[in-house]
Image: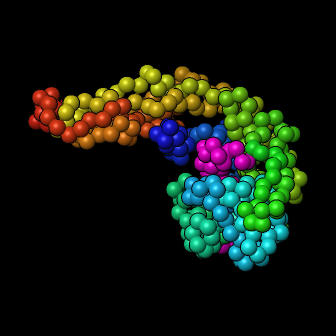
Amino acid sequence: MKRIFAAIIFAAVTVVNFVVYAAESEPKISATSAILVEASTGRIIYEKNANEERAPASMTKMLTCIIALEKLTPYEEILLSNEAIMTEDNTLRWEPLDSVAAKDMITAVMLVSENGGAVALAQAVSGSVSDFADLMNKKAREIGCKNSNFVNPNGLPNPSHYSTAADMARIAVYCMKNPDFRKIVETKRTSIKWIYPKEKWSELNNTNELLGKFKGANGIKTGWTRAAGGCLAASAKRGDVELIAVVMNSTDMDTRFDDATKLLNYGFERVRMVEAIDAERVDKKVFVRDGEQATVHVGLDENLMFPLMAGEDTKLLQVTYDLPKIVDAGISEGQILGEAVLRYDGKPVARVPLVARENIAEGFSFASLFVTLFGSFLV
């Protein structure tokens, strides 16, 4: 499963968006910046000023919470420091000595946009907000963000805290690969209990108004400040098509939902998923030098589905394989040895890891000795 997850992430992060589908009737939205992408690949369907730097408000918490999910155990106790308690616009009215489990704090941060809770998570992970901000920026770069800088875990206004619709979409695509994250953001209503004091609890109602109203809605995060305007990362799935819309600086807290609805409807009318690579049909061999056998089988962990727009033809999809001719022995099953490159009309649009299907230990075989001695003739 780890290899499958890594393959999916690899495909999503390395996708090359070769065209943005343009139609005569593009959605009319109030947001200053926006983007619509297909969720498994990140392929861009629509964009408007998507690379302009803007305040992301509480959409920031997507990054905070995915880091917390990756770094903390679910029942790890999260203590509320004075800094967390005193953070602006706390929803749950924290008091000294309060503590909750990490999974409950992450839920509160995502559902009701708990600002102090985001600070508490940052401190639990990194010890301080400033050190956590460094981790946020490192993670953002790993995900593929190009025009973002984070200085706090909650998105409260700061001139040095900014992102873009495109980068927020990259973060959203990454986050939605995590099943625990998905389970949280699709939750419309739940409750959490404190570890201390034991009798304390709170009901949480998700601020994402699309849940239960828009067909297929399953996330992700709202945002609002006067500086940022209305912000929303919204996801929805219908059939095998899942889309993510990001809007920034919508007119107000209501129009962000209207804008996202228009974008999602626009995408569902135009996108279809096709099986671009059948994993069962991919069986490549690579020569092995100084090994117990002379070749290693290489393949894909799973099929690659790819979004096509209205008017695009599956006949223009082609797969090429980027593999070395010879590798050294000492290969582990699942080790990435190359990549399958999906092309549309000759242009690369997605890349997926090609992995070893077996272990090849260092050792001797006559066939491998032949590869070692005459490998230059095989290349």
Front residue of 242 and 162: 242
User: Is residue 2 shown left or right of residue 149?
Assistant: left
Q: Residue at x 73, y 48 (%)?
A: 185
Q: Residue at x 36, y 31 (%)?
A: 357
Q: Tell me the chief SS of the magenta region.
A: helix
Q: Residue at x 60, y 26 (%)?
A: 274
Q: Position of residue 58 (x, y in %)?
A: 74, 61
If the image is split into quadrants, where does the C terminus sit?
Answer: top left
Residue 182 lies in the magenta-colored region: yes
Residue 201 lies in the magenta-colored region: no
Q: Position of residue 205 (x, y in %)?
A: 85, 52
The correct choice, above or below, for 40 with respect to 195 in the image is above
Task: Specify whether residue 28 is in view.
Answer: no
Task: Specify whether residue 333 is in view.
Answer: yes
Q: Which residues are magenta?
A: 158-185
User: Is residue 186 shown left or right of residue 11?
Assistant: right
User: Is residue 307 shown left or right of residue 239?
Assistant: left
Q: Position of residue 366 (x, y in %)?
A: 11, 29
The correct choice, above or below, for 301 with respect to 133 in the image is above
